[in-house]
Image: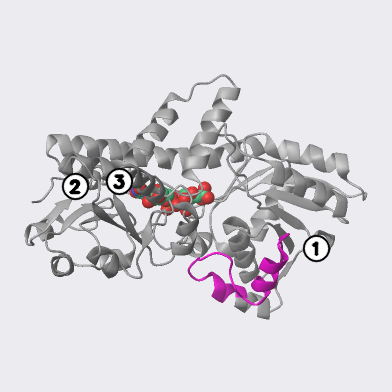
Amino acid sequence: MQIAVVGTGYVGLVTGVCLSDIGHHVICVDIDEQKVERMRKGISPIYEPGLEELMVKNYEAGRLNFTTEHNKAFKDADVIYIAVGTPQQEDGTADLRFVEQVAIDIAENLQKDAIVITKSTVPVGTNEKVKRIILEHIKADVKVEVASNPEFLREGSAVSDTFNGDRIVIGTESEEAANTLEELYKPFGIPVFKTDIRSAEMIKYASNAFLATKISFINEISNLCEKLGANVGDVAQGMGMDDRIGNKFLQAGIGYGGSCFPKDTNALVQIASFVEHEFNLLKSVIQVNNEQQRLLMKKAKERFGSLKGMKIALLGLAFKPNTDDMREAASIILSEELVKEGAEVIAYDPISMDNAKKLLPEQVQYAGSAEEAVKRADVVFIVTEWNEVKEITFTDYENWLEIPVIFDGRNCYSLEEARKHRVEYHSIGRRSIY
Ligand code: UGA
């Protein structure tokens, strides 16, 4: 099939590249000329394992191309994906300006029948709006259907998630469109769930809200475990053995960040309020997460009283490992609050330092390696569980610091291991080791 993908962020680029890899002809559209030029050379604008290899392979095979020209992309397309950003506005709602502009562009350039699919996460009812906009602006005498096909990939494993997803959700106006899209996705061999458009839009928000709820739930349990002397790792493992609960997304830590959970949970609370529904459960999930992101600082303050003048190494800055994405990362709020407390922050991340420099307070210093950050500090905060950070052993800490004091926000080490060493080790939902 001939496919056009508008927007080359995480969702658009990964979708376009993977669809070309299963044999479709894909043209990715972006307004940024330099970005398009770089993508043609096989340079990905985002750090995503495996993506560049597939970009080069499919570009060279002639199945994948990049352009800034909408008319060129839409002219022959059977299917057009809208995968532009839906940033959060101040009131928590999603900003749909980019989606709406793309709908106009599509309408003005379309020359044959097409299915327009929204992949961006959009409030329930948006696809109907997209359809209205297209019908208002359409020039040629062609038939357009809209469809919702939400994306469930995770940053850092986006390519493998696309090839090995649990399900593909397709919400369409007609059965014919649903069948066409099912056919398009067939080579992935992933179960397809067909439904109406509004339900598909809702599945995306409900899924992210549920996963965020699981995380805030285990984080609340971890706070209780600390007070009651239990070990949250064992509690989560014991809970997860029940298939009804499942063992995934029960890793206690310093909360969720990223471009999705914070934005989508806030948006769903807003969406609910528009239909006069107070989504109290989700509001609590968000509140728990806001507090959890500050937890390492709270623990350090409880331990030392004041953090004034203290040198604190932040290991890992991205919102999770294997990405350079800093959006809503706990490191931002932590470094802001640490600076406010008068602490000296020495930050290190294997990949996201350039992005971090734009977001962390200007007082933050940066180290060229985890070892350097630790050696320059009095206390270590483990913020993101990169392999490089997890591979640091307690023996290393003993060698690098006179009295190693570690606040581990991601439970990277076992308590047994900590007990064998001359370290002070505080983690999440477990006893502290002195
Ligand atoms: C999330 C969803 O997992 C994807 O299914 C969805 O497609 C995506 O949002 C989206 O809406 O686009 P992502 O934000 O890339 O994906 O990252 P996750 O791996 O889900 O992690 C999100 C945050 O939760 C991270 O900060 C991570 O550290 C935290 N987390 C995750 C925990 O604290 N504990 C866990 O057990 C799991």
Direction from residue 85 to residue 70 in the image, left or right: right
Of circles 1 and 2, the one toward us is: 1
- Dot 1 beta carbon under 8 Å from ligand 1: no
Rounded to the nearest angstrom, the CA distance separating label 1 from label 3 is 51 Å
Residue 207 visible from this viewpoint: no
Q: Is residue 42 magenta?
A: yes
* Magenta-drawn segment: 26-55
Residue at 55% of width from left, 26% of height from top?
272
Q: From this viewpoint, which residue is outermost toward the bottom?
A: 60
Q: Which mark is residue 234?
A: 2
The amino acid type found where label 1 is placed reads Glu
In which quadrant of the rendered view does residue 4 lie? bottom right
Q: Quadrant of the rendered structure where residue 232 is?
A: top left
Q: Is residue 135 above or below residue 65?
A: above
Please give the residue where the numbered disc 1 appears in the rendered image: 69
> Looking at the image, which residue is at 7% across and 57% down?
419
Rounded to the nearest angstrom, the CA distance separating label 1 from label 2 is 54 Å
Measuring from the top left, give residue 57's x and y in whole percent: 61, 78
- Write down the quadrant of residue 16 in the picture: bottom right
Report the residue marked by disc 3: 342
Q: Is residue 307 magenta?
A: no
Callout 2: SS = helix
Task: Give neighbour class at mark 2: few <14, some 14-19, many 20+ (Cα, 10 Å).
Answer: few
Q: Which is nearer the N-term, disc 2 or disc 3?
A: 2
Q: Amino acid at mark 3?
A: Gly
